[in-house]
Amino acid sequence: MTEPYAWEDVDGTIWNHRTSLRDIPLYTKQEWQGLTDEELREMLGYGKGGYIAEYTRNFVNAIEAKLREKNT
């Protein structure tokens, strides 16, 4: 059997090690989710139909790729 990647305590806190016998082992990680265009427009204050320039989307994609790399 594989080792858990983390442990969840009774309060819902996630730990990278077991803190008590009541901790629940976690075996699967949540799949990476990038920002949608709608979320990006909202963050940039563009409104629902605002145009996202290609260089802006490329910059966001580069940031997401680096974060994905660091968190896998």
Image (tube, grey):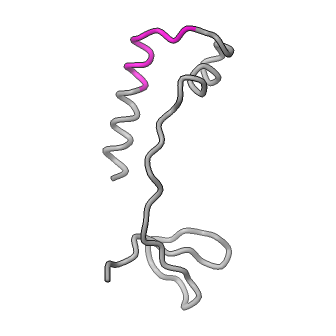
Residue 62 position, x and y percent, is 35, 28
Between 59 and 31, the one nearer to me in the picture: 31
Residue 69 position, x and y percent, is 31, 44
**Above or below for 31 versus 43:** below
| Residue sitting at x 66%, y 16% | 45
> Which stretch appears magenta?
51-60
**Above or below for 45 versus 1:** above
The N terminus: image quadrant: bottom left
Drawn side of residue 27 relative to residue 37, left or right: left
Residue 70 position, x and y percent, is 33, 47
**Above or below for 6 versus 67:** below
> Dividing the picture into quarters, in which one does residue 63 lie?
top left
| Residue sitting at x 43%, y 25% | 60
Residue 31 position, x and y percent, is 44, 51
| Residue sitting at x 48%, y 78% | 25
Residue 55 located within the stretch drawn in magenta: yes
Most distant residue in the bottom direction = 21
Task: Identify the main secondary structure in magenta.
Answer: helix
Looking at the image, how many numbered discs can be counted on the residues? 0
Drawn side of residue 51 relative to residue 4, left or right: right
